[in-house]
Amino acid sequence: MTLDEERVLAVRAMFQRIVARYDLVNRIMTLGLDQRWRARAAALARPHGGLALDVGTGTGDLALALLARGARSVVGVDFAPAMLARAGAKAGRNGALSLALADALELPFREASFDCVTAAFVLRNLPHPSAGLAEIARVLRPGGRLVALELVRPRQNLRSAPLRLYFRHLVPILGGIVSGDFAAYRYLPRSAQSLTANDLARAVAEAGLEPEGWWELAGGMVSLHLAVRPKGLEPPPHHDG
Ligand SMILES: C[S@@+](CC[C@H](N)C(=O)[O-])C[C@H]1O[C@@H](n2cnc3c(N)ncnc32)[C@H](O)[C@@H]1O
């Protein structure tokens, strides 16, 4: 098994373990702001009347926000079955949300299937975020919108210093106590170190998407990116078998 494969398995096992308190920890550690960020991401995706894909949907909050914004139908994919089970329970009988077990690096959809694609707090968990973005670019229709929300390494400045201290030192303890899983919430600030907002903007452009803008939230600890698949983006070569 390669190191990347080992890492993917470890990340999946971690998300399987923390599902019971996942939403609660999010609400507590962001003082409820996480739901506002998702609402903003959903609005930026302009899903109204279209078919949306939410990659790494977790417990489905962003997928539900896309439906609230008028998406005709939303598909949420995740590689952790326990997360999908929770998303399904939240969606109840809402038939406009379909959930599928799938790897973000190998999306089981045809080229140009979706009007918009969202990914919240997912890309930094992939061994290579650029590979996930290439898959997203493939399944987006030309003119379709990508919205990515991500925890990133903020610029070192005085304004972000208290938040950085909170995130690095208090969140692991708080998340550990509430979830009972200290390892998972030590991973959280560590994983946020892997990517800056600039890295993400560059990776989005390298995937062939046209960046439309990005915004800093939470003092620069969270970044929100909007990009569009250009009309002329060539589909990747087709491989049989
Ligand atoms: C931090 S959670 C974010 C969940 C949700 N998007 C949200 O806003 O709360 C990351 C999610 O991405 C999923 N994930 C991570 N790597 C993945 C991969 N390679 N393929 C599919 N899902 C993945 C995890 O199982 C987890 O549910």
Image (spheres, rainbow, N blue to C red):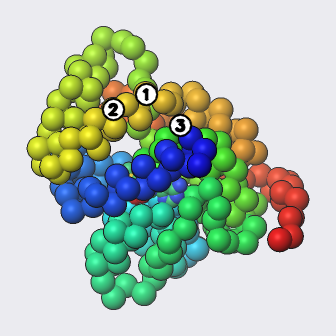
Q: CA distance from mark 1 to mark 3?
A: 18 Å
SS class of the residue under badge 3? Answer: strand
Residue occupying image coordinates x 57% and y 58%: 104
Q: CA distance from mark 2 to mark 3?
A: 21 Å
Which corner quadrant of the image does residue 165 belong to? top left
Residue 38: horizontal and vertical position, in percent? 38, 54
Q: Residues within 10 Å of mark 1 (few under 14, many from 20)?
A: some
Residue occupying image coordinates x 42% and y 64%: 80
Relative to 164, residue 106 above or below? below
Q: Are marks 1 and 3 in contact (CB under 8 Å)?
A: no
Does residue 65 appear in the picture of this structure?
A: no
Q: Considering depth in this image, is 146 or 238 the residue closer to the camera? A: 238
Q: Quadrant of the C terminus?
A: bottom right
SS class of the residue under badge 2? Answer: helix
Tell which tag, 2 or 3, sits nearer the viewer: 2
Which corner quadrant of the image does residue 67 belong to? bottom left
Q: Are marks 1 and 2 in contact (CB under 8 Å)?
A: yes
Indicate which quadrant contains ligand 1. bottom left
Q: Are marks 2 and 3 in contact (CB under 8 Å)?
A: no
| Residue that numbered label 1 is attached to | 193
| Residue that numbered label 2 is attached to | 189
